[in-house]
Image: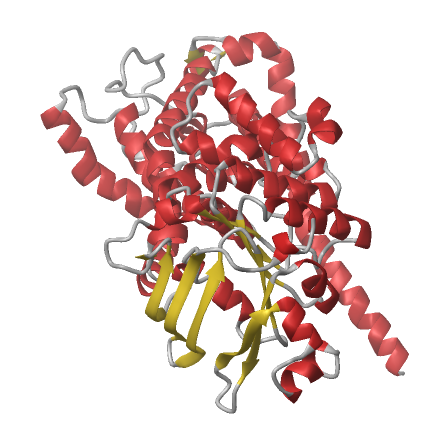
Amino acid sequence: MKKFKEKLSGRVFFALALSSISALALITVFIIVQGVPIIAEVGFVNFIFGMSWAPSHGEYGIFPMIIGSVTVTLGAAILGVPVGLCCAIFLSEFAPARLRNLFRPAIQLLAGIPSVVYGFWGLLFIVPFIRNVLGGPGLSILAGAVILAIMILPTVISISEVSILALPRQYKEGALALGLTHWQTIRSVILPSAKSGIVAAVILGVGRAIGETMAVIMVLGNAVAVPTSILDPVRTLTTNIGIEMGYASGPHRQALFATGIVLFVIIMALNSTAQYITRKK
Amino acid sequence: MDDTAREPRRDVKLKTQSVNLHYGDFHALGDITFDIPSCAITAIIGPSGCGKSTLLRIFNRMNDLIPGCRVEGGVFLNGSDIYDKDADVVALRQKVGMVFQKPNIFPMSVYDNLIIGPRHHGVKSKQALAEIAERSLTLVALWDEVKDSLHKPGLGLAVGQQQRLCIARALAVEPEVILFDESCSALDPESTMKIEELMLDLAQKYTIIIVTHNMEQAARISDMAAFMMIDGQKVGRLHEYSPTSDMFISPKDKLTEDYITGRFG
């Protein structure tokens, strides 16, 4: 009887674990089944590099959206990564324990704010600020980049901090014992030693930024056009799906799923790169 | 080396005067006063937890890294107080190098490990750095073994080689004093022997202080021996300090004798 119970509980746990994996499998299969036919119909090159997105005319080119995603994400990385990295260095190397215990939960809290709240805040403060100070419509790459930079901070900070704290204490002691200053120790020994973790932090942050939808939908302006300046509105791959899913049908809907496939591939590639880098260490 | 050269008689390099060290409320070292002769090997011995490493780390102020650590009393290098409030800790650590228990090679090439000290202390020319690297490696008898793999990762070396690389790295900074914190305890007998020979060599020019658990090692290579014990309040105290030959032949009292003959500890 006891043996039976043991066996049963093992099976139950296995079934539950399997269900989470199968959710992933189901979603993957579903978007592929839905999206691949339209890519085949339009042609892979036309789909990825097509400049015109006009579903009502049967034109499905997502290149402007790819540019939109790349520029906004790049902007977020340029703004967010230095801040996040400095914050991680401060927390792991300079902050007294009491300050650290205050900062850490506060940063985790940033990750808990719903993205729609970020978007709303961006729409009310960042967008008018950009419009008044820098000109243009305000709804722009820059606005999206600022919001996303804040949103990726928790990822960048916590993963790089963990990778710095995971270094053997002997590295730091060894460098200081050679007469290096604290800053020289950080720059020449600690950061290079934690490099793989920091790179992984950046990649995961970028993955988070590229997949974000709700916050950027509200501040990007969502125009389907290749931008010429960071003050221009753009549409990203995610917002394209978010905006049009409600009324799309037929090939249009399939094209949105196909957009999803492209996103899926990009994020998978980023995450597996991050995993590869951390594991190699 | 002949016997006359091993008589500890030279000028005082380091001096502690009534040093007390506290970690927060814990009194770790009590009233330590002793002189360390220049160009000799001084061994700090004693049972585990008696504060040997803590005492060693006073000399390059490594204890500063531990929050809540306080040092009272005077510690003098070449006559000047290293705990003075105007004292430059970074400059101190250039003069007082340290080799740790486990080799702590940084995850970079052998060459980069060697030049990291001098590079940050203002040596810019590539040629000068290369000369420093070769000289330091030659001093630790590692040059022939690694000269063809200077640009390979230092962590790829055998543990004994890594520890000698750590010594070379410390020498590259041109210190006056080198602290060895149980630096042979992670090594096999052969590597240990190499490092002991190296220490004897280095003692001609450098002041060496070692912490060791190994009584034979202390007897083999040290000129002076400092035996530490904890008292009833768990405070680490200097129980006996004398020339090694005196301590091992005629210890001051039963406690020292029992320890060095291996009856406890």
A230 or A62, nearer to the observer: A230
A70 or B112, nearer to the observer: B112
Q: How many marks?
A: 0
Q: Is residue B241 above or below residue A135?
A: below
For the question of whether residue B151 can be seen, the reply is yes
Q: Is residue A35 above or below residue B72?
A: above
For the question of whether residue A202 can be seen, the reply is no
Going 48% across and 44% down the picture, which residue do you hit? A175
Q: Quadrant of residue A268?
A: top right
Which of the image's four quarters has the C terminus of chain A?
top right
B180 or A4, nearer to the observer: B180
Q: Is residue B2 above or below residue B226?
A: above
- In percent of width and height, residue A131 lies at 14, 26
Going 81% across and 49% down the picture, which residue do you hit? B190
Q: Quadrant of residue B227?
A: bottom right
Which of the image's four quarters has the N terminus of chain A?
bottom right
Going 83% across and 77% down the picture, which residue do you hit? A5
- In percent of width and height, residue B141 lies at 70, 35
Q: Residue furthest front?
A: B4
